[in-house]
């Protein structure tokens, strides 16, 4: 039973950390600016871009640190 709760908590934490910020940004943008302006779409697109590539950048940094290409202290 404990593993099921831990697995559910992990899934819930991942989902909230991954999707809730984007949803909140979208709601705030469109409630303040409205859907007729182009700025909310650009900002939301940039937020998706950040969310898509931040893991890949972090992974690349970890590989570079592991292979000694950059110092871990920097």
Image: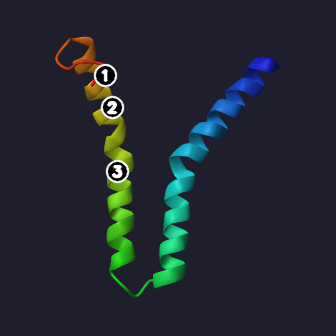
Q: Earlier in the sequence, mark 3 or mark 1?
A: 3
Front position in the image: 3 or 44: 44
Q: Earlier in the sequence, mark 2 or mark 3?
A: 3
What number is the disc on residue 46?
Answer: none
Q: Residue furthest top?
A: 67
> Could you tell me residue 14's position as x and y percent?
57, 38
Looking at the rendered structure, the secondary structure element under dot 3 is: helix
- Quadrant including the C terminus: top left
Look at 64% across and 31% down and name the residue there. Answer: 10
State how far apart marks 1 and 2 are (Cα). 6 Å
Report the residue marked by disc 2: 58
> Could you tell me residue 69's position as x and y percent?
16, 17
Report the residue marked by disc 1: 62
Mark 1 nearby-residue class (10 Å; few <14, some 14–19, many ≥20): some
Compared with 62, 16 (above or below) is: below
Quadrant of residue 4 in the image? top right
Compared with 3, 32 (above or below) is: below
Asked if residue 5 lies left or right of residue 67, the reply is right
Front position in the image: 18 or 4: 18
State how far apart marks 2 and 3 are (Cα). 12 Å
Mark 3 nearby-residue class (10 Å; few <14, some 14–19, many ≥20): few
Pointers 1 and 2 in contact (C-beta within 8 Å) = yes
Pointers 2 and 3 in contact (C-beta within 8 Å) = no
Q: Residue furthest right?
A: 1
Look at 60% across and 46% down and name the residue there. Answer: 16
Asked if residue 37 lies left or right of residue 68, the reply is right
Report the residue marked by disc 3: 50
Front position in the image: 28 or 19: 28
Look at 44% across and 83% down and name the residue there. Answer: 35
Look at 33% across and 31% down and name the residue there. Answer: 58
> Could you tell me residue 2's position as x and y percent?
80, 19
Asked if residue 44 lies left or right of residue 2, the reply is left
């Amino acid at each position: 039973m404990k593993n099921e709760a831990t697995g559910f908590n992990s899934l819930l934490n991942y989902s909230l950390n991954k999707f809730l910020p984007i949803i909140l940004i979208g709601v705030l943008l469109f409630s303040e600016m409205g859907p007729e302006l182009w700025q909310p779409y650009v900002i939301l697109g940039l937020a998706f871009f950040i969310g898509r590539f931040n893991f890949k950048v972090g992974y690349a940094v970890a590989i570079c640190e592991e292979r000694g290409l950059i110092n871990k202290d920097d």
